[in-house]
Amino acid sequence: MSEQTLKYKFDVSAYRLLGRELITDRITALFELVKNCYDANSTRVTIDFYDVNPRSPQSRIVIKDNGMGMTFADIRDKWMVIGTSSKRREGTSPAPFNRKVTGRKGVGRFAVDKLGSKLLLKTRKAGEKQTLCLEVDWSAYTQEEEDQLNLFSSSPKLFTDMENRYWYEDSSDGEWHGTVLDITLLNDVWTHNDIDRAYKELSKLIMPSFTQRYPFEIYINATEYDDYREKKVESRAIEEATLKVELGYDEKVKQQETLICQDGELGRGMIKELPCGLVRMNIYYYDKNAKRQYKKTTDTLIDGLKVYRDGVIATPFAEYNAEQNLQKDLFGIDKRRYSGFFDKISTRDLLGWVDISWSRNPNIIDATNRQDFVGNEAWLELKKFVVKQLVEIEKYLKSKKEAARTETESQFTDMRVDMSGLRKDINAIKGLPGVSGEARQKLEQVEIVVQKAQASTNSILKEYQELKTEKRQQEDLLFSLVSLQTYAGMLSHIVKTSLGKIKRDAEFLHRHFPDPQFSAHYKRLADQIFDEMDRLGKAMDFMLKYAKDDQNFEDIDVKQVIENLMLNTYRDIFSNQHIKPVVEINKALSLYYNQKSLEDIISNLIGNSIKALSGINGEKIIKCSVMVDEDMLVIYFSDNGCGIEEKDRNKVFDVFFTTTAEQGGAGLGLFMVKARLEAIKGKIELVENELRPTGTTFKIEIPFKKP
Amino acid sequence: MEQGKRTATILVVEDDKGQQTNGFALEVETGFERVVFKETVNDALAFVNDNLPSKIIILLDLGFPKSEEQGVYFLNELRKQSRRIPVIIWSGRDDIEGAEYQEIINGSTFAFLSKSASSEEIMEILRKADDYLNSQIDTAVESWLESHSEEERKKPFLKTSDGQSYSMEDLLREIRMQTPFGKKIALDINKLTIDLLFRKKEQI
């Protein structure tokens, strides 16, 4: 038998499936596209949203940068190729920017697909006369995809067979170079809230306020939202810093500003110009909480100090290292052994830059490998100066910590650490060559004592921690009881009102039936009694459920809970009613709360939305997006249903308020949602509908920390 | 006027629409000529303002939607206009305390009824309030008015020293509105009544 070969084939649906795996949500999609602009040495990116709420044939997103642009070869060999790894091979963007490449492997095309079905790409290299245009029409691809899902499709077309039109245009806008992505046939509505989320995500790409020669600026425009008019995206990273230090110099008297820690206070002083020349320096120190906060607001790492010369990064660059441990520690910050291990700042607690220039610091010279500076006096002095600043900060932090060190647990922890240090030291001394046998014996005795003390410290610490956990549990219980009491008060009000109504209806029947004078009313009174009893029953159920549920607080995965509800539990109902569920949560978020309660809250809102959508023709959407705002988990829950009438807006949370009595509404749902949220110091409010033209949006806030 | 019905208007200030169709409303209608429901405090105040000269008894709920004026506000505003109208608090709450409690007492409320009260209990209080109103001078003046023809009631009837002239109906209005003149005339009528009554006490 003769040998033959088989080729892989890649059809359109496989391509799109792959895309959906790679780019899970549209905020990420936008983020990836803007990262590509950064990698292309752009200094300015504008994102324009046209008519994106509600979605219409005019809806359009345009991303324009002033980067390098692409040649025909770039388009053919990179843009049109899936999984191009050129970025990874090179690691930095071309000189003089030398930006550390941020974009992921060739996912830009998928990102576009996530945003809309049709792309018009225009690109021009600097100095070129003509603009290269490429049209990619995914709606054609979708047709192809559908055909492929059809079993009897006669000619399955491969992805690689799809043809995309390209042409050249004479440019009208003079000197411009860069790339424009003009995306139409959008997949989603972009509400104000969605653009806020995009803004927040994009702010992670921005360097903290620092004058660079090659800055990177992002502007957002949205025709429909007044506060997005050339709105500049700003970094929020520095806001989170625990300590912000800015040092300058006085050029006239040739003096350098420096930090001095004295009597527990961090002050500043002036010293004579050092051999390295005058420098400007910004240092941001992040403690544990600040670091956590930083991670939430930015995508960049807290990665130590960098040197910029005349606004361009000098070093470290061109050394992409995913392993933070392997990254270059230019100033030797992590190698120091000046102070105790626990008081030492590491590169991971610091963000900052040293600003030098050829004119002020001519003696600091780049090493030929461009990884370092030449180890001359100027550079060594600068290193010393930088480290000195850190030492002052460490002194300050240490004195602050000592002053604050009253909490038992931290003392225990320190004690334990100190003791283990002590044992190490003892061992080290024992191992020294000059130590006599007698001394060694004594040391062994000391070691045993330390060991015992260490053991009891450990057990005390453990007990203390157990006590703390127990206390926390008690607090939770107490907390849910207190709120239960409050709501028991409200429920007694409900019950009284309800019982009163039933009683008086029955009383009337009892007193007057069958007096023909009132015969027009008897049936109605009987119906009212029945309905009121039914409501009362529901109120009772709620009260019991409330009493049962809210005692178990645990760390729950918000993303999983909400996705499960929106995409699984309600899947059949949604598909029967032709409702499109949209869930926008871009990462797992852990919330200390009761899972059942969260599910109840979302289910209630879903139930309301389904009712509100029942009379709507056209696209029906129920949308739930989750974001983080400081210590709050914020959920926006929206539908594009009939909306809530102006006169009712203030009453929707009132007990027994309902506009859907015929559909079985008892007016308890939103009351219950509000009650639950208030019990945990959360909030729910009716905000302007984010989906246009009609609809409802609820904003829910839940504190991450228990009150 | 239907036989046996009392003439006072019962104004129910209550946001819960369900109460309008409740058995108690029918029951009140069997005993009083007119029952009016107002769902907001401001609507109720406007109603009182427009009908001040007539005999009104108010059944007042305390809790309204958070965004709206509450029952206590109604009471305060009403008392700026008239201290004479009996107000019966009708509430499901049993936690009234502090400033709110003080305001309710200072608002000269007539009685407190629970939301779970029976129609009979409500009627009993309403009848008491009506009796109370009937023992007041303005009501006495009103029934005295009824013994006169329509024409007579509208004619100038009394002239004050400063030349102001009042019809019988004006007189009633002045007393009900508690204008300075109304207050003075009410006081004078009381004094005179006592004087006349006890001057011939052997005839009582």
Image (cartoon, coloured by chain):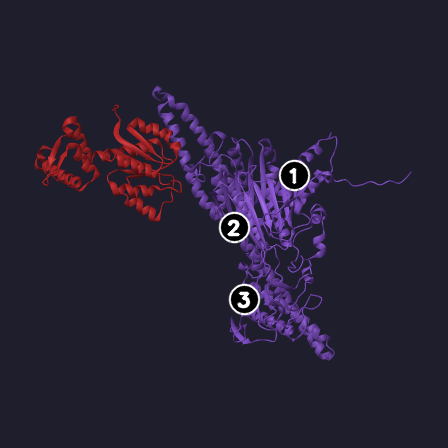
Q: Type of residue at label 3?
A: Val
Chain identity for the colour purple used in the image:
A
In the picture, the disc for residue A137 is 1
Q: Do the residues labelled 1 and 3 touch (CB within 8 Å)?
A: no
Looking at the rendered image, the disc whose residue lies closer to the viewer, 1 or 3, is: 1
Residue at the right extreme of this rendering: A1
Up the image or down, A99 lies above or below A249; here it is: above
Q: Are marks 3 and 2 in contact (CB under 8 Å)?
A: no
What residue did someone put label 2 on? A230
* Nearer to me, A442 or A529: A529
Report the residue that reaches farthest toward the top: A516
Q: In which quarter of the image is the N terminus of chain A?
A: top right
| Separation (CA) of disc 3 from disc 2 | 31 Å
- Comparing A51 with A433, the one in front is A51
Counting other residues with Cα less than 10 Å from the Cα at mark 1, is it few (<14), some (14-19), or many (20 or more)? many
- Chain B as rendered: colour: red
Foreground pick, B91 / B120: B91
Q: In this view, does A377 lie above or below B93?
A: below
Q: Which of marks 3 and 2 is nearer the N terminus?
A: 2
SS of the residue under disc 3: strand
What chain is tagged by disc 2?
Answer: A
Q: Same chain for marks 2 and 1? A: yes
Q: How far apart in space, not on screen, are marks 1 and 3 (Cα)? A: 52 Å
Q: Name the residue under label 3.
A: A245
- Please check whether the numbered discs 1 and 3 fall on a single chain: yes
Q: Which amino acid does label 2 sit on?
A: Glu
Direction from residue B117 to residue A1 in the image, left or right: right
